Image: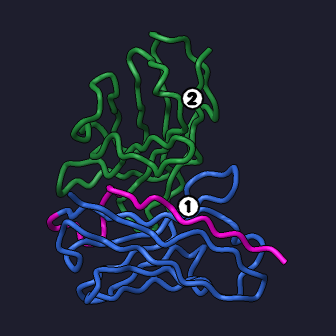
Amino acid sequence: EVQLVQSGAEVKKPGESLKISCYSSGYSFTKYWIGWVRQMPGKGLEWMGILYPDDSDTRYSPSFQGRVTISADKSISTAYLQLSSLQASDTAMYYCARMTKIVGSGSSGWFGPWGQGTLVTVSS
Amino acid sequence: DIVMTQSPDSLAVSLGERATINCKSNQSVFYSSSNKNYLAWYQHKPGQPPKLLIYWASTRESGVPDRFSGSGSGTDFTLTISSLQAEDVAVYYCQQYYNPPHTFGQGTKLEIK
């Protein structure tokens, strides 16, 4: 069974940095893109970016480029989302999700399954 | 970026009745080389991660009840729930995966009338 398990809730102060994790099991971690999605309180889903663990190829949404870093540790089948210089507006639920593999379609694919989500609260 | 716009923003439907959610992209998400529309639908309930319902615009994910169906091509798509059940109350999102960033629609909140 494919499972993605995220790290626990975080409370941070403005200006701090944060790295949340997403551990994958039940499939070949390096052969599927893995992505991150943000949901701010009361708002919709926002696609942040994806990473291909085998070669660390990464695609970011322009809305998040420069503000976040997506990485992975292949040895422990874990992807990471790093947010720097946190602001109150970074308060959100963050989800990781595996992107399905479409032969011949490079970095295209739908998300499924998803991690359970990590709630990040930024408050002074 | 491809912009995805859903309508309506919210919808109230009686149990057993049909619910229809629309999704429009500002450019085609049809890939002619594969003859497929790069469009997915998700269901999101409070306290749970989103759940994939439909991909390729009309292919139902394994285990998804057949009352859920997707249709459309190019820039205009529809998610239909043929007979609304209480457990279908959720927010529904469309997503294009034609080009990164794989943008979502703003969501449609579905409630019971």
Amino acid tagged 1: Glu
Looking at the image, which residue is at 32% across and 41% down? B54
Up the image or down, B67 lies above or below A101; here it is above
Query: Per the image, is A53 magenta?
Result: no
Q: Nearer the viewer, residue A106 or A55?
A: A55
What is the crowding at mark 1: few (fewer than 14 residues within 10 Å), some, or many (at least 20)?
many
> Looking at this view, is B81 or A1 the one in front?
A1
Q: Could you tell me which chain the residue with mark 2 belongs to?
A: B
The chain letter corresponding to green is B
Residue A88 bears which disc, if any?
Answer: none
Q: Quadrant of residue B109?
A: top right
Q: Is residue B22 above or below residue B52?
A: above
- The image quarter in which residue B66 lies: top left
The disc label shown at residue A46, or none: 1
Name the side, left or right, on which A78 lies relative to B85: left
Q: Secondary structure at mark 2?
A: strand
| Chain identifier, colour blue | A
- For the residue pair A96 and B76, the one nearer the viewer reads as A96
Q: Is residue A50 above or below residue A4?
A: below
Q: Quadrant of the C terminus of chain B?
A: top right
Q: Which mark is residue B110?
A: 2
- For badge 2, the amino acid type reads Leu
Tell me where the magenta segment starts and ends, as one range. Answer: A103-124
Chain holding disc 1: A
What percent of the width, then of the height, locates residue B97?
36, 58
Horizontal and vertical percent for residue B41?
40, 43
Identity of the residue drawn at 77% across and 82% down: A13
Q: CA distance from mark 1 to mark 2?
A: 19 Å
**What residue sits 18% from the left and 57% below the top?**
B33
Residue nearer the viewer, A40 or A59: A40
Q: Residue drawn at (45%, 45%), measured in percent from left and top? A: B94
The way the protein has been coloured in the rendering is by chain
